[in-house]
Amino acid sequence: MKRRILIGALGGCTLLFFLSQLNRREIIPYEDPQGHHKEAHSVKRFSIVAGTPFSAKAGYDVLSRGGNAADAAVAALLALNVTFSEAVSFPSVAPLLYYDASSGRVESYIGAGKAPEKATIEYFRSKGHSVIPKMSILAQLIPASPDVAIRLLSNHGTKSYCELSTPAIDLARNGYPILRTTAKNLDMNIFKRLGYKFLMPYNAHVFLEDRWWQPIKAGGRLRLPDLANTLDELCHAEEAALRAGKNRGEALAAVREYFYEGPIAQKIVQFHEKEGGLFTANDLRTYRGGIEKPLSTSFKDVELLTNDTWNQGIVVLMALQILENIDFSKIEHNSPDYIHKVTQAIELAMADREAFVGDPAFANVPTAGLLSKGYASRRAKSLSARAFGKTPDPGNPWEFETLRKRTSVNPNPGNTAIAAAPAGLSDAETLGQKLSPWKRNVGKDTSYIAIVDARGNAVSLTPSDFPMSPMVPGTGLTLGIRMTQFKLDPGSPAGLAPGKRPRITPHAMMVRKNGKLFMVLGTPGGDMQAQALVQILMNCLVYRMPIQEAIEKPRFRSRNWPDSFSPHEYFPGQLDLEASLYKADAQSLKNYGYNVSEFPDWDNAFSAPGAIVLENNHMNLGADPRESTTAMGD
């Protein structure tokens, strides 16, 4: 009996080995920037930092040909949608800041889609859900990124969509080498790959290329022909409009119409109707982003700017204002005392995020109070000698609210803390629901693009979304899982409502100094995004580090609040450290009362920011080694 089992096991292993060698992906020799120290990069004319080398090259080429920041941003975005497609989908979220050099004005563009009109808390609860499920068509948000790209080109660009999409189409059709970060993001054992094939067959077809038995390896050629065809269809829509005598603006509008009202919209709606989704033609046809005034506040001698409260960018501003009340001149950088103070400031800001921050069209957010110096000073008094141990209580920014927001549809004007799951448990686990065993694979959150052109115009863009929900068959389109950043709690500012935007984690940032652009920066990383940017800005603005050094320094991460993605996991008192910090500070931080965990140095769990700093007539570029983030310029 044992012999038969052994022979069977050997036979199975032999078959798996044979399959693994069958029809292997072509390996493309390439140099991956991930995991390597990156030399400081300083240029004078124009610059770009983007999440993959292919994206950076697409934007760089546009700038070299005389295109401006808006043109280069769209070319880089589309190339990023292809070459980092498990993290950044074409119909994704895409928070945007744009700096106009002639006026010195910064505008924010709303880059997050809305919940479909059928999406209500009652609907999800009627289906037995306590949170919005991942790996489900119900997790999909109305697309925003195509709207962002066309509006950016219409308002500020000079090139055609066709010209700017050509590099992305070529990469998708001919293939590109899988980056190390992508290989890590898509790392699944054979059983998970087989499960992925059965659970979401089209997704598996796209990313596994019908080789479910083979692991995805860095350097393997990945082709995305369906996505190439979709991007090409949009190009044909623009060309047809121009042939019909339309001007540039009208031709760009035709591209948008083709996506939101034409054949692509029809494919998306038909897919939702077939699979029990919530999208309707009206949801897509009526979707619009919009220009808004960015949030801003001062810190030291600079002005910090980010998007409005449909994302978490305000957390960076709040945390830094709290830290402004502390004298760091005698506190060693990344010492236990430093980590403790910065962590607590972030946790206080996150507590206020949970209580007050949401789509300002629906939630009555006390923005002026949250960003007031008086409120920051009061919150700084809540800093304690020991770790909070659990999410601290929110403050009362309404006492400092001098500029009342308009009446909201779903106001939350009180001092309401959002109830968290029990220690270490998610909402789903509390109810005994078993999560998918491959939930931490099949995509990683977000990427980033920073651009400054030869005229001084700049773009900060943080696109995202990943294939953890069913892709639209035949299109190569990932509609993501951003609905999971809603709460099924009507009392939460991030509570679900039809037509509402979730409080997404991606956000864009800029910094002005003496009225002029000083920094363009952003990062991937879910709830780590705000934490990484706080740490980098402290490194630059308080400890005066050059930007590349500031980005490469080891980082820490608190998890002391419910995670933004469902099932909103919560780990009270949890503090994660990269290895060099763990070796130096772990015991002291345990003594402060933290639950401390060690991660490898330069692990992309700690985000991968990119940044451009403008000083002394130079642009100093920073690209994080934690991913394949790449800086280029001239």
Image: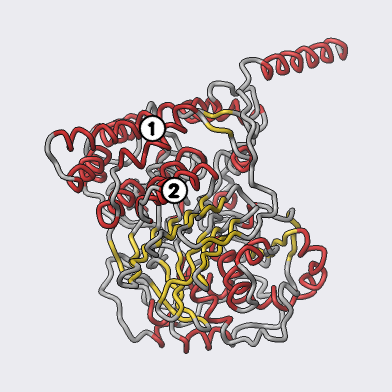
Looking at numbered disc 1 in the image, what kind of residue is underneath it? Val
230 sits left or right of 629 in the view: left
Residue occupying the far left of the picture: 245
Query: Which sits in the foreground, 30 or 580?
Result: 30
Residue 135, visible in the rendered structure: no
Residue 627 lies, in percent from the top left, at: 61, 49
572 sits left or right of 411 in the view: right
The mark nearer the N terminus, 2 or 1, is: 2
Name the mark on residue 276: none
For the N terminus, which image quadrant? top right
Q: Secondary structure at mark 1?
A: loop
Q: State the residue at coordinates (36%, 28%).
A: 229
Q: Secondary structure at mark 2?
A: helix
- Callout 2: few (<14), some (14-19), or many (20+) C-alpha neighbours within 10 Å? many
- Callout 1: few (<14), some (14-19), or many (20+) C-alpha neighbours within 10 Å? many
585 sits left or right of 166 in the view: right
Query: Which sits in the foreground, 96 or 314?
Result: 96
Q: State the residue at coordinates (36%, 76%).
A: 413
Residue 255 to residue 346: above or below:
above
Residue 119, visible in the rendered structure: yes
279 sits left or right of 203 in the view: left
| Cα separation between marks 2 and 1 | 28 Å
Looking at numbered disc 2 in the image, what kind of residue is underneath it? Gly
Q: Quadrant of residue 11?
A: top right
Query: Which sits in the foreground, 537 or 525?
Result: 537
Residue 260 lies, in percent from the top left, at: 25, 41
Marks 2, 1: nearer the viewer: 2
Name the mark on residue 472: 1
Q: Quadrant of residue 494?
A: bottom left
Residue 569 lies, in percent from the top left, at: 58, 56
Residue, disc 2: 59
Residue 579 lies, in percent from the top left, at: 77, 58
